[in-house]
Image (cartoon, rainbow, N blue to C red):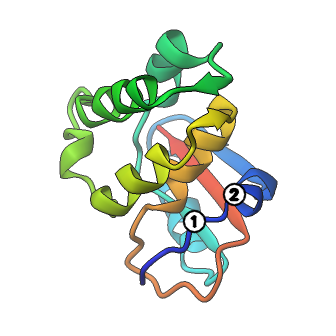
């Protein structure tokens, strides 16, 4: 499914976190949420904190800063997991949409945009909620 970028729609999407101890059932809960056609929740990808350290205070984005953000995202690797560039995201569309955020845009909106572009194993009919699960 090709996602259509609408900055206002992305900004208004609610975002939730699933947090728990290892082996406590959080992966099952993530899968149950992701099976819903209106919920998009990616696999574990703990990049928010590392990107926040570098870009969290940015509200006015120029093309160079957006490219730095995208390149930093692509270089993320997760201990015992995988690299972001190997994950099931629509990377080319994500880059295009990130670059379309030039000007006034919050860090939160860019994070939501990343999660919006996660390609789920389940069919989506219209994403209304985004989520993250760690660990």
Q: Is residue 60 left or right of residue 80?
A: right
Residue visible at 56% across and 38% down in the picture: 102
Element marked by disc 1: loop
Q: Is residue 28 above or below residue 80?
A: below
Can you give x and y, in whole percent of width and height, for residue 81 in the image?
A: 22, 38
Nearest to the observer: residue 72 or residue 21: 72
For the point 35% across and 24% down, which residue is it?
A: 68
Q: Is residue 88 visible?
A: no
Lower sequence index among marks 2 and 1: 1
Number of numbered callouts drawn: 2
Give the residue number, with chain letter if any, for mark 2: 10
Q: Do the CB atoms of the residues marked 2 and 1 lie less than 8 Å apart?
A: yes
Q: Can see residue 111?
A: yes
Question: What distance separates the C-alpha of mark 2 from that of mark 1?
Answer: 8 Å
Determine the secondary structure under disc 2: helix
Give me the residue at 30% from left, 56% from top: 91
Viewer-proximal residue among 4 and 79 = 4
Q: Quadrant of the N terminus?
A: bottom left
Q: Which mark is residue 5?
A: 1
Does 131 sit above or below residue 36? above
- Residue 25 pos. (x, y %): 53, 54
Instruction: Find residue 109 and report its horizontal and vertical position in percent.
Output: 66, 42
Would you call the spot at circle 2 few (<14 residues within 10 Å), some (14-19), or many (20 or more)? many
């Amino acid at each position: 499914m090709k996602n259509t970028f609408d900055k206002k729609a992305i900004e208004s999407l609610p975002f939730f976190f699933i947090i728990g101890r290892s082996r406590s059932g959080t992966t099952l809960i993530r899968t149950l949420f992701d099976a819903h056609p209106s919920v998009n929740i990616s696999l574990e990808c703990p990049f928010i904190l590392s990107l926040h350290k570098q870009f969290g205070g940015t509200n006015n984005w120029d093309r160079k800063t957006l490219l730095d953000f995208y390149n930093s995202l692509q270089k993320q690797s997760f201990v015992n997991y995988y690299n972001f560039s190997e994950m099931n995201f629509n990377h080319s569309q994500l880059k295009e949409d990130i670059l379309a955020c030039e000007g006034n845009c919050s860090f939160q909106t860019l994070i939501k945009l990343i999660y919006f572009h996660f390609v789920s194993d389940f069919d989506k009919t219209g994403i209304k909620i985004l989520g993250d699960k760690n660990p």
